[in-house]
Image (cartoon, helix red, strand yellow):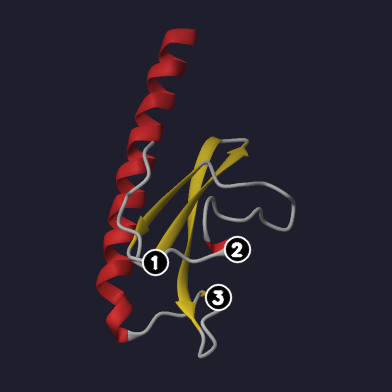
Amino acid sequence: MGKSASAPASSPSSSSSGPAPANASGRRPVDEVRNRNIRAAIWQNETENGVMYNVTFRRSYRDDKGAWHDSDSFGYGDLMNLAKAAMDAHTAITAAVNKDRRRDGESS
């Protein structure tokens, strides 16, 4: 799965640049797609019914002092970028599911 290359002109620094941060259990997403200041982190979860994928969305922004922060709240102006990130995440997950199915078909 590839990463979308639509980052803002000046990239966020510290935890906002590079891969998405690990969650509370220390796991990292299996992929990440970006559309401008919106990031979609794709998480893979093993379940008794097989592999499941979930997506979390974050918006990067600068405060009045120029420091970068992340939020999970989206304004009207963010919605089209959020929708594009969601579509890109859907495409990435579809590719991963198809790859999983091909691999599972070869191993049976």
Q: Which mark is residue 92?
A: none
Q: Tell me which amino acid carries mark 3.
A: His
Quarter of the figure with the N terminus: top left
In this rendered view, identify the residue nearer to me: 74 or 67.
67
Q: Position of residue 107 (x, y in %)?
A: 49, 9
Residue at (32, 51) in percent of width and height? 5
Local crowd size for mark 3, using a 10 Å CA cut-off: few (<14), some (14–19), many (≥20): some
| SS label for mark 3 | strand
* Above or below 91: residue 37: below
The answer to whether residue 33 is left or right of residue 44 is left
Look at mark 1 in the image and give the residue it sits on: 10
In this rendered view, identify the residue nearer to me: 14 or 50.
14
Look at mark 2 in the image and give the residue it sits on: 14
Look at mark 3 in the image and give the residue it sits on: 69
Residue at (66, 53) in percent of width and height? 22
Of labels 2 and 3, earlier in sequence is: 2
Q: Position of residue 14 (x, y in %)?
A: 60, 63
Q: CA distance from mark 2 to mark 3?
A: 9 Å
Q: Tell me which amino acid carries mark 2.
A: Ser
Is residue 108 visible in this depiction of the protein?
no
Is residue 98 visible in this depiction of the protein?
yes
Residue 75 picture quarter: bottom left
